[in-house]
């Protein structure tokens, strides 16, 4: 049973618009949440993260929001660029060491 | 830059063969991990290790074993490969809870096909 769920397998947005990727988790012991980006034929690379003591973390065009009571987090990309087209994985950890990943959302940004 | 390398990008094996997947990291990380990636299932944790000669089961350890004889090297072993082990295998490493956001660094993956 997956503890981290990304219910949208794919998302398509127009260049310049906002992309919103969602993630839900079931384990209340998770305290650290990360987003990874994966291009074809490459391993995932770290994008942005947030700990449970915060509800928002921003890094340039990327913002992660955490709603701990709803066990939900989201990644906002604004403005979206064609180079952002990739698979995005949500990950969560109870101890900042081992992580559990979601199934991924494939984002396509159209020029 | 952290570098995680995996011994093969593509591997084709026959059912019943013993398969070794090797992973090496060059940043003196304590933690190492093995995942498999399948469509619709994302990355699932097979085994991980926090130190030399230590190993912990992840969520799907059945049919796999691991070896960590040196800090920089973590091997995944399929004792008797089966067709349902056809997958993309990803290795990762990280520091031991090295900071507020302990990111894992991934290798490029090994695409294993079991015939």
Image (tube, grey):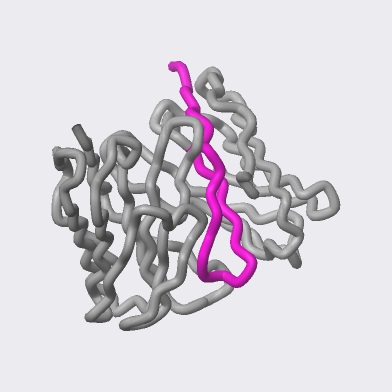
Instruction: Name above or below for residue A94 compared with residue B60.
Output: below
Q: Residue at x 41, y 36 (%)?
A: B38
Image quadrant containing the N terminus of chain A: top right
Q: In the rendered image, which quarter is residue A29 located in? A: bottom right
> What percent of the width, then of the height, locates residue A87?
45, 35
Instruction: Name above or below for residue A100 compared with residue B54.
Output: above
Question: In the rendered structure, which segment of residues is drawn in magenta?
Answer: A88-111
Residue B56 located left or right of residue B66 = right
Q: Within the magenta stretch, is there residue A109?
A: yes
Q: Residue at x 56, y 43 (%)?
A: A102
- Say which of B35 and A9 sits in front: B35
- Say which of B39 and A22 sits in front: B39
> What percent of the width, then of the height, locates residue B60?
47, 53
Q: Residue at x 55, y 26 (%)?
A: A9
Whether residue B1 is visible here, answered yes or no, is no
User: Which residue extends farthest right?
Assistant: A69
Image quadrant containing the C terminus of chain A: top left
Q: Within the magenta stretch, is there residue A35?
A: no
Number of residue marks: 0
């Amino acid at each position: 049973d997956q503890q981290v769920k990304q219910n949208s397998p794919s998302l398509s947005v127009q260049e310049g618009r906002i992309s919103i990727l969602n993630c839900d988790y079931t384990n209340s012991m998770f305290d650290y949440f990360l987003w990874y980006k994966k291009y074809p034929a490459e391993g995932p690379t770290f994008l942005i993260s947030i700990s449970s003591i915060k509800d928002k973390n921003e890094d340039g065009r990327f913002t992660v929001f955490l709603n701990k009571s709803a066990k939900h987090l989201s990644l906002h990309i604004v403005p979206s660029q064609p180079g952002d087209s990739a698979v995005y994985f949500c990950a969560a950890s109870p101890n900042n060491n081992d992580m559990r990943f979601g199934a991924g959302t494939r984002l396509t940004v159209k020029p | 830059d952290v570098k995680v390398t995996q011994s093969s990008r593509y591997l084709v094996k026959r059912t019943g063969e013993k398969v070794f997947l090797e992973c090496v990291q060059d940043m003196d990380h304590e933690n190492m991990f093995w995942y498999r990636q399948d469509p619709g299932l994302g990355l699932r944790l097979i085994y991980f290790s926090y130190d030399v000669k230590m190993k912990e089961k992840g969520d799907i350890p059945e049919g796999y074993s691991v070896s960590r004889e040196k800090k920089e090297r973590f091997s995944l072993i399929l004792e008797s490969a089966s067709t349902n082990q056809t997958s993309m295998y990803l290795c990762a490493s990280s520091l031991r809870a090295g900071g507020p956001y302990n990111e894992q660094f991934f290798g490029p993956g090994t695409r294993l096909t079991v015939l």
